[in-house]
Image: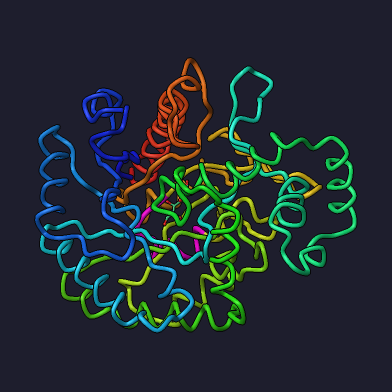
Amino acid sequence: MEKTWRWFGPNDKITLDMLRQIGVEGIVTALHHIPNGEVWSLEEVLKMKNFIEASGLRWSVVESLPVSESIKYGGADRDELIERYKESLRNLGKAGVTTICYNFMPVLDWARTDLDYPNPNGTTNLYFNLGEFAYFDIHILKREGAEKDYDAETLARMEELRKTMTPEGEKRLVENIIVKTQGFVNGNISENDLDPVQKFRDLLKLYDGIDAKQLRENMAYFLSAIMPVCREYDIKMCVHPDDPPRPILGLPRIVTCDADIEAFLNAVPDPHNGLTFCAGSLSAGAQNDVPALARKYADRTWFVHLRSTEVLPNGDFREASHLGGRADIVELVRIFQRVNPSLPMRVDHAELMLGDEKMGYNAGYSFHGRMKALGQVEGVMAAVDREISEEKK
Ligand code: DNO
């Protein structure tokens, strides 16, 4: 697989020269300065491409070309927004940047409650605490009927938490769940929003009456509309699975498991409609056998995120080592390396370590932690390449 790295543009504290030194081959990035819903002009695309190439790297994957909420919930202006999306795709296609990651998660992209949860070795990482998430939903967001979405054990944990919750604790949950994890992925809420909770409630309202079936139809509508452009420029669209892979905050989620993946691939049966195989997101669903999914969908996978999680019996999950947890990265490398040795792959959500914590990196995107994870994955790739060449003898 091609060793790629998510880089956040010329303002990223991690420079392209640093990445070349650690063995990165391809860059995964987006035009983060262009607001969601606006066209990425050919000029802006080429500017970014040339900037990356000047450092001896290539722009391998766009992550993400964001899909506007209105396309997801089927708003009155969705056709206009789809036309703009197609225009951005054409410009990317003309520039030869043809692997495009996106997601179809309503309102919230990925979700975590804790961004620096301590590990026993002194590093920290991301964590999803279901009790704290329920607290956010029921006591901060005050979503109508939210209690019904949690089991008795989770509600009991939440009550315990309530006894010691402070205003600072509530503020931290808001920041972690809807601000810090969202702003940098071109999300709906940014650090400058004065009342993020109210803004978030207004966004949730947009999905009143939208169930999983309707969301699936809207996704198929979007994909069918963009496929002609994708065919013309050989653009590979690859949807990112939902993280965590389950409905949250009353919102439907439709890329969570085997049946979901099969459904969206079959809804628009064109190879340009494919998957970002995010091993981390999929592994956070106890229902998912991650290597089995990789075997089944490798031929429609255009981009791979390698990371792993551990799911706890109480519904929490944590980021695991890239060599441990539920994802089984060794087996995933065996599968993908055989199918397509040039498939772009990046590591994800690594520890904060050795001073990373002072650098203010985007949540999940440390330097030393990701460098260590990349080294681990490189080692696995070398061993798998040896296995493959021995088989051929
Ligand atoms: C989180 C990321 C996601 C991902 C988008 C793709 O760390 O994996 O934000 O980039 O969902 O559209």
Name the main secondary structure of what is drawn in magenta.
helix
Residue 187 in the image, given as x and y percentages of width and height: 44, 54
**Image-quadrant location for residue 78:** bottom left
Residue 139 in the image, given as x and y percentages of width and height: 77, 53
Q: Residue at x 44, y 75 (%)?
A: 265
**Image-quadrant location for residue 112:** top right
Residue 345, compared with residue 214, is above or below; it is above
The outermost residue toward the front is 194
Residue 367 in the image, given as x and y percentages of width and height: 40, 26
* In-front residue for pair 269/62: 62
Residue 119 on the magenta segment: no
Q: Residue at x 26, y 64 (%)?
A: 38
Q: Residue at x 44, y 62 (%)?
A: 103
Residue 301 in the image, given as x and y percentages of width and height: 39, 61
Q: Quadrant of the C terminus?
A: top left
* In-front residue for pair 247/285: 247
Q: Quadrant of the N terminus?
A: top left
Query: Count the marks: how many?
Result: 0
Residue 140, compared with residue 39, is above or below; it is above
Q: Which residues are magenta?
A: 294-304
Q: How is the image coloured?
A: rainbow
Q: Residue at x 31, y 38 (%)?
A: 7
- Lateral position of residue 125 relative to residue 310, left or right: left
- Lateral position of residue 67 relative to residue 106, left or right: left
Residue 268, compared with residue 278, is above or below; it is below
* In-front residue for pair 198/280: 198
* In-front residue for pair 46/306: 46
- Lateral position of residue 174 relative to residue 58, left or right: right
